[in-house]
Image (cartoon, coloured by chain):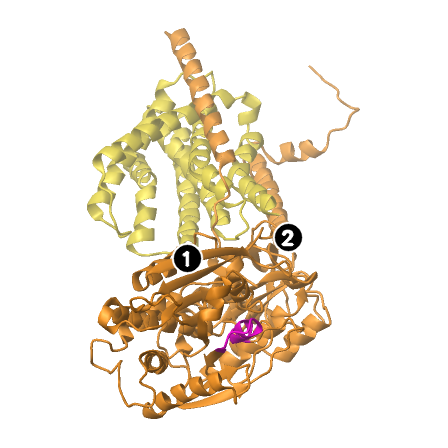
Amino acid sequence: MTMFHFFNCAILTFGPHAVYYSATPLSEYDTLGTSVKAALVYLGTALVKLVCLATFLKVSENDGFDPYQELLKAVIGFIDVAGLYFALTQLTHRNISQNHKFQAVGLGWAFADSVLHRLAPLWVGARGLEFTWDFILQGLEANANLVLSISLAALGSLMWLRKNKPKTLIPIIYACAGIVATMPSITSYLRRGLGWHFPKVVGFELFTSLSMAFISWQLFSACQRPSS
Amino acid sequence: MALSKNSGGHRGMQESMYSVIALVFILVACVELCDAAAAIDVYRLIQYDMSGSAYGSRFAALNHHAASLHFPPGADLSRAVLIIPLRELNITFVREYINQKKPLGGLLFLLPDIFSFENGGNKQVHEKEQLKNLLAELEQLLIHANIPYPVYFAFENDEIDTVLADIKKNDAIGQPATATTGGYKLVIPTPEPKKVASPTITNIQGWLSGLKADGDTNQLPTIAIVASYDTFGAAPALSVGSDSNGSGVVALLEIARLFSLLYSNPKTRGRYNLLFGLTSGGPYNYNGTQKWLRSFDQRLRESIDYAICLNSIGSWDNELWIHVSKPPENGYIKQIFEGFSNVAEEMDIKVGLKHKKINISNPRVAREHEQFSRLRVTAATLSEISTAPELLQGTGGLYDSRQFVNETAITRGVKLVAESLARHIYGHQGKNVQIFADGGSLAVNPAYIQSWLDLLSQTPRVAPFLSKNDPFVMALKKELTDHTDEVNMQHEVLEGVFTFYDSTSARLNIYQVASVTFDLLLLLVLGSYLIVLFSFLVITTRGLDDLISLFRRPPSRKVKTA
């Protein structure tokens, strides 16, 4: 029955990605290649981030919140944004509309993130006899991450791929992109600095991801109006 | 450029695929990490066969749900482990369960801290005596029963106390843990217990030569001082036997030390040889002593004037007993007893004489001196216990821990024996001479006694589990070598009447498990979540019609109008 639990948590963590791919027109236009390429770019970004973290970050004994270290982590987190920029602009994609491009890139990005960060703990931990809620919460976090990645990709495509944007919306776009990009720092601050428990943090992540998704959707459709 | 980029990307993808596959293999090979709610050391009930009958707990591996004493009546416990703290033990309940052979998954007894050496310390518990008697009764019940499921002992600590409180709460609601209702699972992954092949018993003897006058060719008379050092108890890994017979061993070592001081100077060397014997096999009718005596040369055996056996002299107040097999009217016995009584009077101790005839046809040997008496050697046992113990009773079990032994009692006992022996050796009977006076260079050393007693109270000494070169046996040998002229070790095999099985201690993992129903429910919830997500996405991106068209795929009517 512990393999059963592992199976449950696995479909919670990775199921939505597959569902997203098959439900939206992405499957019709066969954008799998784009997603795979985005996943690989994520792997490369993760490696670069790892090297930077190992070089610049000091190992702290206590689990408290060190503002300087967190600032450094946030700066390194912007490598993520650079990676996304690379994936959106530099890679050659087949002829797919911008609408679908950012979705495919975001999907691949989020899938790679889930696999890299969540598969190993799931395999080692969820198969044991001991039951914890951690893995279910981790799955919910993966869901929130998917939504966040897609909204970040949407905002990214707005920033770099769309040339004619209404002037008033540009600062809002950049502000939202900034918030979404610094989400990891915000969550780690909540966990360490304020001492929130895991379920609370996951709830916060879900809420913000949904709201950011909604905002970026509105921005995207607002920017689409002049060209349509 | 696009082409090269593509091929480069392709190769990169291949490489990353290989590394991912390698990583997956490593993870698959990973041993399941133990992430239990609690992991504690547990000690198994002894498993042995005596004359073909099986006794003790016959199984070691455990993998069942936990239950407490508050289980709802009528619940099926055949796949549950009952956790019983000693304080809440109802001995009739356990006796009923065992005697009526009711099915049970396992038993786990929780012992209070006072019975452990590290944590017991000097805590004052007001029900000490009560708990001690209860534990002794439980031990006797378990040792003589044949139990077809694992029985373990553990010491109470915070982790298991919280787990037990949780289990009691669940049981009180009326929801005993099974596969479908979650709860706690106790797992001890040990292999099946195997027989201990040829258990050895090791006797250690130390010889201190007396002063032979020039020209004297006769053998000097010998006095033997003997104590058995091994134990037998319900949990072999916890049978430290502080009183039975740790106190005897400590006393023997101290007496050896004192006499070695006296004998080191030829001017104070007595005209008696001293033979110190640390025997094994005590609980099994003093089998080791018998083999030791049988190995003696006839001349040596005849030269033994008398033997004093020390057993359980660690927790008495004012009264000691000398047990003999020869009738009290016998001259030798009178001499010995008078010698002891005189010294005892000076020390304000009451010494009583107990006589019990030996029956050679009865294999039961209750006290060590009886082995000597069977070979016509005058012997007596000095003990605080007045009655003769039964087989496997009073042999240093779980309840016999450091807490209940008093160093002062041992010190006084040592002084009594040493003084009486010295007066006999040097011919000062009846005279009021204090050879081992307090404060002198020959005073009994309480620090020596305490340190050896502490060591003994931390060393479980069940003979079949002590190998020939066990560090403790070697330590005893070294100590005797320091105090005597010649030390010999005799290795024998324990008689075939007893067979022992290994696996005496293990590590218990306590897991908090969720039930199957929980996972099924979770699967249902997740399935519906994914379906809802799917429909939501289809509706928002492709429109409601597309969703409906997914379900309506009529095989006919595929009219393709251009």
List the single residue furthest toward the front.
B215
Mark number displayed over residue A168: none
User: At 48% across and 78% down in the image, what residue appears?
Assistant: B381
> Residue B224, percent across and down?
42, 71
Q: Nearer the viewer, residue B189 or B24?
A: B189
Chain coloured orange? B
| Amino acid at dot 1 | Asn
Left or right of residue B347, residue B330 in this image: right
Q: Disc 1 and disc 2: Cα gap in Å? A: 64 Å
Q: Chain A: what color? A: yellow
Q: Nearer the viewer, residue B355 or B150?
A: B355
User: At 42% across and 30% down in the image, what residue appears?
Assistant: A109
Magenta residues, as a range? B367-379
User: At 26% across and 35% down in the image, what residue appears?
Assistant: A53
List the single residue furthest toward the right.
B556
Q: Where does label 1 land, which residue? A: B488
Q: Is residue B119 above or below residue A62?
A: below
Q: Is residue B282 above or below residue A198?
A: below
Left or right of residue A3, residue B156 in this image: left
Q: Where does label 2 land, which residue? A: B516
